[in-house]
Image (spheres, grey):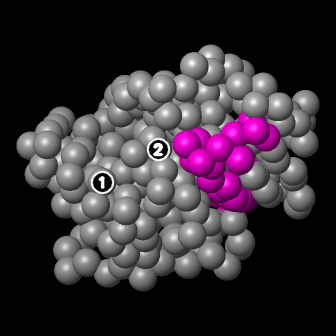
């Protein structure tokens, strides 16, 4: 795992991800209750926010992630919050637990990009769900691409524990895949900068007191038809899909049911 967002920047992940965490937890828990799910596995759980929150709501949760730093952060926070979530380092392509689960999550756009990897993911998820089990995941819809933002440098910033975190992102799309480069600058507590401009960001690269990280990612845009085809070929059927506002964007979700 070479991405700084999942290693050196783990402490900032829940801040910079930009999710409405409480609204999302409400949405997910409602789906889980509607399907009478009790046990849950969070595939690519990141820092474990969803798993910890759902544990507090009475669900039996397990989180798995390939990043050791993510899992350590999740375990530490679970201990602090006194919640009994279980967190495991591993790959969602290969994890084969001794028990099966009522439901699975895969959020933060963790669905694979290549067709063969999507199938591997869904095939393995099928194997760890009980008959009639459900999978909830978020994804980007082709119809939701904001073309005016493609190729443009977008700046976001946050404050946490006296530090200023600045992210400058630029993305390009090829074959319905967004390739994004994110530059993160972490200004120390003593920094007086309120809104660093481009000149100051370049200057920061030479300032040993300002940390700089470059994170690269890729996210695939799917159509609902594609989601349905992938689901069918791995033994699932789509039972719901919906949108949730996310600023000027929208977050898409699909709910798949394991066919018995």
Horizontally, residue 44 falls left or right of residue 17, namely left
- The residue tagged 2 is 13
Residue 75 coordinates in the image, percent (x, y) = 22, 56
> Does the image show residue 77?
yes
- Between residue 8 and residue 122, name the one nearer to us: 8
> Does the image show residue 239?
no
Residue for point 32% across, 50% down: 48
Q: For the residue labelled by badge 2, is the local secondary structure a helix, a strand or a loop?
A: helix
Q: Counting other residues with Cα less than 10 Å from the Cα at mark 2, is it few (<14), some (14-19), or many (20 or more)?
A: some
- Disc tally is 2
Horizontally, residue 32 falls left or right of residue 121, namely left
Residue for point 57% across, 19% down: 192
Residue for point 48% across, 26% down: 190
Q: For the residue labelled by badge 1, is the local secondary structure a helix, a strand or a loop?
A: helix
Image height check: is 10 above or below 12? below
Horizontally, residue 201 falls left or right of residue 162, namely right
Residue 23 coordinates in the image, percent (x, y) = 41, 25
User: Magenta stretch?
Assistant: 201-229
Whether the magenta-drawn stretch holds residue 209 is answered as yes
**Residue 81, labelled with which disc?**
none
Quadrant location of the C terminus in the rendered image: bottom left
- The residue tagged 1 is 73
Residue 117 coordinates in the image, percent (x, y) = 62, 76
Residue 25 coordinates in the image, percent (x, y) = 36, 33
- Between residue 159 and residue 23, name the one nearer to us: 159
Earlier in the chain: of badge 1 and badge 2, it is: 2
Whether the magenta-drawn stretch holds residue 87 is answered as no
Between the residue at mark 1 and the residue at mark 2, the CA separation in whole angstroms equals: 10 Å
Image height check: is 166 above or below 177? above
- Between residue 90 and residue 40, name the one nearer to us: 90
The reply to whether discs 1 and 2 touch (Cβ–Cβ < 8 Å) is yes
């Amino acid at each position: 795992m070479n991405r700084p967002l999942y290693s050196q920047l783990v402490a900032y992940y829940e801040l910079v991800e930009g999710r409405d965490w409480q609204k999302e937890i409400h949405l997910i828990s409602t789906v889980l209750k509607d399907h009478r799910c009790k046990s849950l596995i969070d595939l690519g759980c990141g820092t474990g926010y969803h798993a910890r929150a759902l544990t507090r709501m009475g669900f039996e949760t397990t989180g798995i992630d390939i990043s050791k730093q993510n899992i350590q952060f999740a375990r530490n926070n679970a201990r602090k919050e006194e919640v009994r979530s279980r967190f495991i380092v591993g790959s969602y392509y290969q994890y084969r637990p001794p028990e099966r689960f009522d439901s699975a999550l895969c959020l933060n756009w963790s669905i694979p990009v290549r067709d063969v990897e999507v199938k591997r993911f869904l095939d393995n998820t099928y194997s760890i769900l009980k008959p009639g089990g459900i999978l909830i995941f978020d994804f980007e819809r082709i119809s939701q691409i904001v073309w005016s933002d493609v190729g443009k440098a977008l700046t976001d910033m946050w404050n946490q524990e006296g530090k200023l975190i600045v992210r400058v992102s630029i993305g390009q799309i090829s074959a319905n895949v967004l390739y994004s480069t994110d530059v993160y600058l972490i200004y120390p507590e003593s920094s007086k900068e309120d809104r660093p401009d481009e000149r100051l960001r370049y200057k920061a690269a030479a300032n040993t007191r300002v940390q700089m990280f470059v994170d690269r990612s890729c996210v695939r845009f799917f159509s609902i038809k594609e989601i349905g085809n992938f689901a069918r070929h791995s033994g699932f059927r789509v039972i719901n899909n919906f949108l949730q506002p996310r600023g000027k964007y929208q977050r898409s979700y699909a709910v798949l049911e394991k066919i018995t």
